[in-house]
Image (cartoon, rainbow, N blue to C red):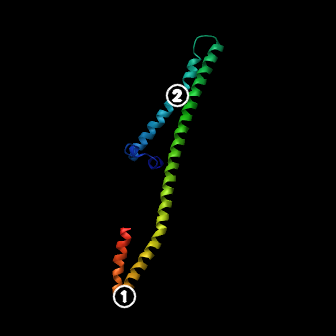
Amino acid sequence: LGRRRFASSAEVGATWRSQTEMVFARDLSERRRHATVALALLPAPLAALVPGSGQFRAVAAASVSAAQAAYHVAAAEWGVAHAADAVADKQRTAAIIDTYANQAARVGALLPFTSALAGLCAAAAAVVVEVAPAAAVLFPAAGAVCAAA
């Protein structure tokens, strides 16, 4: 569920699978993981089979192991950097969403005031029309003056 929730729109179509497809994909992933571990462990013992003295073979195995360790550390750092970028993207998105929510709350706070003001204007217009119908001419004239300004 988490992989689908945080997937991009391009990945959703490719990752939306049935339960059977997900089980097969997980099994394939585990097989690849085991093969990767086996291949990672293989070079150091093979380096010990090079011809030469025992000291030379130990140095060869140690140097291959050091190179492997450096590679895997770099790969792990790349994964961590990729994850940090994804988290930063999600934090930026959350900040933008929070900004829009605050803006909507500010606009929503004005609605009761504007609604009350509109009701007051409607009531004032009704009172003026009922009390002094001749003064009702002032409303369109005042509207035209305000619109022209």
Marking on residue 77: none
Q: Position of residue 91 (x, y in %)?
A: 52, 49
- Seen from the viewer's position, the closer of residues 17 and 109 is 109
Secondary structure category for the residue under label 1: loop
Q: Position of residue 42 (x, y in %)?
A: 54, 24
Q: Position of residue 84 (x, y in %)?
A: 54, 42
- Seen from the viewer's position, the closer of residues 61 and 107 is 107
- Residue tagged 1: 132
Secondary structure category for the residue under label 2: helix
| Displayed quadrant of residue 27 | top left
Check the picture and name the quadrant holding the C terminus.
bottom left
| 115 versus 46 height, above or below | below
Amino acid type, residue under disc 2 in the picture: Ala
Badge 2 density bin: few <14, some 14–19, many ≥20, Cα 10 Å: few
Q: Position of residue 110 (x, y in %)?
A: 47, 69
Extreme-bottom residue of the structure: 131
Amino acid type, residue under disc 1 in the picture: Ala
Residue at screen point 47% across, 67% down: 108
Among the two numbered marks 1 and 2 on one chain, the one whose residue lies closer to the N terminus: 2
